[in-house]
Amino acid sequence: MARVAGTNIPNEKRVEIGLTYVYGIGLETSKKILEEVKINPNTRVKDLTEDDLLKLREYIDKNLKVEADLAREVTGNIKRLKDIKAYRGLRHAAQLPSRGQRTKTNARTKRGKRVTVGSGKKKAAAKT
C-alpha cells in the first residue's frame, strides 16, 4: 500500500480514486493534483513509481491542508461559532442540523429514535 499524507491508499484502485481516501481530498481535488503533477489518473496505485509517489507527497504537503491539520481547523471553526453564541454554533451544540433543514419530520439521525407521545392504552375505570 502506498502512503500519502499519513493515509494508506489501496493498491488496486486507480490513483484518481485512491487519493480520495485522504481526508480533505475529494474527486475534483484529486483530478487537479494529478493534472499538476502530470500523472495519468487511470494508473493503478501499485503501478506508480517511487518518483511519482514522491511528487504526489510533496505537492500535497506543500499546497493542501489535509488530515489532522484540516480536522483541527474545522473543529476550531465550530468551537469559535459556539463561543460567540452564533446561531450555527448553538445548532452544533444542540446536535441539530445547522444548515436550515427541517426537523419536524426527518433529521432522525440527529434527534434519535422516534418517541411516540400519548399512544398508550387507557385503563378502564375501576368500579366502586
Image: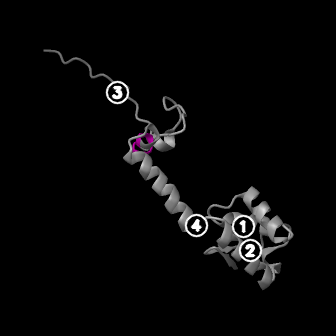
Mark found first going from the N terminus, 4 or 1: 1
What kind of element bears circle 1?
A: helix
Mark 2 to mark 1 CA distance (whole Å) = 10 Å
The local crowd at label 2, few if under 14, some if 14 to 19, many if 20 or more residues have their Cα within 10 Å, is many
Q: Quadrant of residue 10?
A: bottom right
| Residue 56 disc label | 2
Q: Quadrant of residue 100?
A: top right
Q: Which residue is mark 3?
A: 120
What kind of element bears circle 2?
A: helix
Q: Tell me if I can see residue 118 in this picture.
A: yes
**What is the three-letter code of the residue carrying label 3?**
Gly
Q: Tell me if I can see residue 14 in this picture.
A: no
Mark 2 to mark 3 CA distance (whole Å) = 62 Å
Q: Which residue is mark 4?
A: 67
Mark 2 and mark 3 in contact? Answer it, CB < 8 Å. Answer: no
Q: Which residues are magenta?
A: 90-94
Mark 3 to mark 4 CA distance (whole Å) = 49 Å
**What is the three-letter code of the residue carrying label 1?**
Leu
- On the image, the x and y values in percent for residue 64 come to 65, 65
**What is the three-letter code of the residue carrying label 2?**
Leu
Taking the image as shown, residue 89 lies to the left or right of residue 32, namely left
Q: Residue furthest bottom?
A: 50
- On the image, the x and y values in percent for residue 120 come to 34, 27
- On the image, the x and y values in percent for residue 22 come to 65, 66
What kind of element bears circle 4?
A: helix
Q: Quadrant of the C terminus?
A: top left
Identify the residue shown where x is 78% and y is 73%.
12
